[in-house]
Amino acid sequence: MPPLPFTRLALPLALAFAVLGGAPGAGAATPPAQPKEGPGGQAYASASVVKRVLGRTGAVTLAYYGNGAAPAQGRPVAVVLHAWGAVNPQAYGSFIEHLARSGYLVLFPRFQEVGRTRPVDASGLAANLVKDALAELAGDQEAKPDTTRVALIGHLAGVPLAANLAAHARETGLPVPRLIFGAMPGGIARDDKARGVALHDLNAIDPATLIVTVIGDRDARAADVAARRVMREASAVPTDHKLMVRALSDDHGFPALSATLASPAGVNAAYDVAQLKLPTPDPKQKPAPFKWSADMTLTGEQTVLVGQINGAGTDSLDYLAVWKTFDMAAAAAFSGQTATSLKSNPRFTDMERWSDGWPVRRLSVETPRPPAPPKPGAAVAAPVPAKPVAAPGKPAAKPAAKPAGSARGQ
């Protein structure tokens, strides 16, 4: 048989290259979509979300819950504490919508005014905002907060804030949280004069609280150190109430899954704060005196990270490493189970499969080691007293110095 003319071979080859290699990821396996039902899934109780502004000028909390009547027992409460500088709820809009449509009353306290709020004041501001919001909604039959089922969700510097709120819950009049869920912990300062949020006396956290942290394998060292420190200093909480989770990046298909510090964020423009009418300042009220300090400003590294958070998309890491993990942890916490029940459940670590059937890398889970007993004859340091949280308009007392910690990734 005579050879085929070159032009007759060239056209099919060109078409094949265009289909298989003309675009990034063309023909590659795709990551798993959001599950249709179950933890992290889309079998929602509500079709839409009610968005409300609570508080007054300079002290605003945004509230979200599913449309329709609240259940007879009320709605469980999820308090979302943002990363330092990521003050617009649209950065977490996809997660907020998942929580609200799943039945939660979601509170987003705006405890920071970028460039004006000092990290040392953030814990007191957040505590007052949450307390005021719950008081305002206490008699609301649609929002109907169930204060016996409260979860604190922190991202980066929001994790030490969540721990501080839990530690001071009783003295500040906040409901004692059943769950602290820390995503990519960071921004922990060695003391109130350093950049970042200093941890208070976490020994005051209620022993029945479940503490679950999630970190990724990209930029993991700082988040791992911060997670272990929170676990260690919450010494009254038993080991079987603590669980450290690690999400692993996976480039088997396209787009690849990259577990970075910004991974828990997922932008949803429908939650842009600019779409809500915030309280207008009273022209007769004089603003509080402004005292500048260097720790108010964002470093160059923080500015880059905030940009990544504000541009983060939503992918399988959100659905399966964050949303599903939180859903299962909250169900365990609200029913009085320990973290052991999560660790032994294969569904908890399952990340499902790429479209070609290849399994996505599973979550790894670890129970932190219990504190080492003091050596015989060794002097035992006196516990650091609980640091008071400031009431509105009153400064907090100066705290005792804390051990050095990483403030990277706020």
Image (spheres, rainbow, N blue to C red):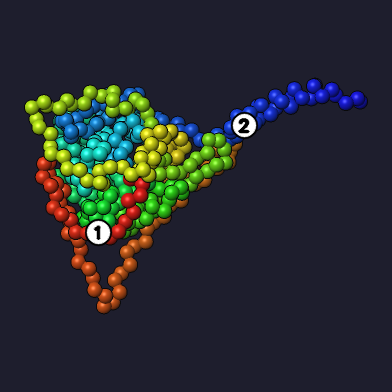
Specify whether 15 is left or right of 194.
right
**Residue 152, quarter of the rendered image:** top left
Q: Amino acid at mark 1?
A: Lys
Residue 277 drawn at (x, y percent) = 23, 23
What residue do we see at 30% from left, 51% from top? 188
The amino acid type found where label 2 is placed reads Gly
Q: Quadrant of residue 12?
A: top right
Frontmost residue, 131 versus 16: 16
Q: Secondary structure at mark 1?
A: loop
Residue 315 visible in the picture: yes
Quadrant (top left/top right/bottom left/bottom right) for the N terminus: top right
Foreground residue, 349 or 62?
62
Name the element at disc 2. Answer: loop
Q: Is residue 204 left or right of residue 82?
A: left
x and y, in percent, of residue 290 in the image = 16, 39
Q: Which residue is mark 2?
A: 27
Q: Which mark is residue 361?
A: none
Q: Residue at x 10, y 32 (%)?
A: 286
Judge whether 47 appears above or below 79 on screen: above
| Residue 180 screen position, x and y as percent | 30, 47
Comparing labels 2 and 1, the label whose residue is closer to the camera: 1
Q: Please give the residue where the numbered disc 1 appears in the rendered image.
A: 402
Residue in the image at 46% along x and 35% along y: 315
Q: Calculate the distance from the C-alpha at mark 2 to the C-alpha at mark 1.
A: 53 Å
Q: Is residue 373 placed above or below 364 in the rendered structure?
A: below
